[in-house]
Amino acid sequence: MKFKGIHHAWSTPIEYNRFNIAGLSEHILTYYDMNNPPSDLGNYNIFDKDCKPINDLKRCAYDNFKNHIKYMYHVDIDTYVTTMKGWITGHGNNYSMSIHNHSGAQFSAVYYAMAEEDNKGGALVLHDPRSNANRGFDDRFQPHFKQIKIQPKTNDYVIFPSHVYHHVDPFYSQFRIAIPIDLYLFED
Ligand SMILES: [Fe+2]
């Protein structure tokens, strides 16, 4: 074996970024029923709508995926046929999302178009994908396997590999718009 030194094997890059899309929250609050928002079930895709705030979101989401994947994986997604699928998650009293991942996509993200309130719960919690990796380790090792908890604010954009299991803590805000976005890469 030629390799000498430390190899941080099987890292799981999670990027935490921010951008603002003018008019997006207003657009969503005007055109969608936030008590019954379009979920990921069925063929719904928020990017099918052709209007400025949605097109701006699509471009920004794509550019952030592109930069992230270039920097972390040294792959240019422009060389693929790409599809992005987005939807809107619910909100309100005691909303939560049980643990899941986004199988089928390669990369996933959540854009928080609106997340203004503090102390209302709703953290995005990402789990160590090395399932049972902490088995047999005592408490002193546990920080290496701990969940990543992100308490979102307006304009936050979180990117992670789609295989990473995650859940959303219960939250109670009436003023939150979270848009999950999946990126699919297809070879030409
Ligand atoms: Fe999710």
Image: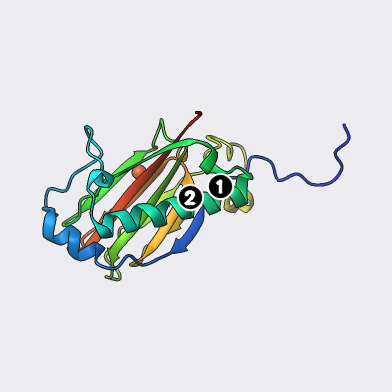
Mark 1 CB lies closer than 8 A to ligand 1: no
Question: CB under 8 Å between callouts 1 and 2?
Answer: yes
Report the side of 75 relative to 102 (left or right).
right
Q: Name the residue under label 1.
A: 69
Q: Mark 2 points at which residue?
A: 65
Residue 51 visible to the viewer: yes
Q: How crowded is mark 1: few (under 14 residues within 10 Å), some or many (20 or more)?
A: some
Residue 138 visible to the viewer: no
Front-lying residue, 136 or 71: 71
SS state under label 1: helix
* Mark 1 → mark 2, Cα distance in angstroms: 6 Å
Q: What residue type is labelled 2?
A: Phe
SS state under label 2: helix
Figure quadrant, ligand 1: top left
Q: Where is residue 114 in the image (x, y as percent from the top left)?
A: 27, 64
Front-lying residue, 66 or 144: 66
Q: Where is residue 158 in the image (x, y as percent from the top left)?
A: 43, 55
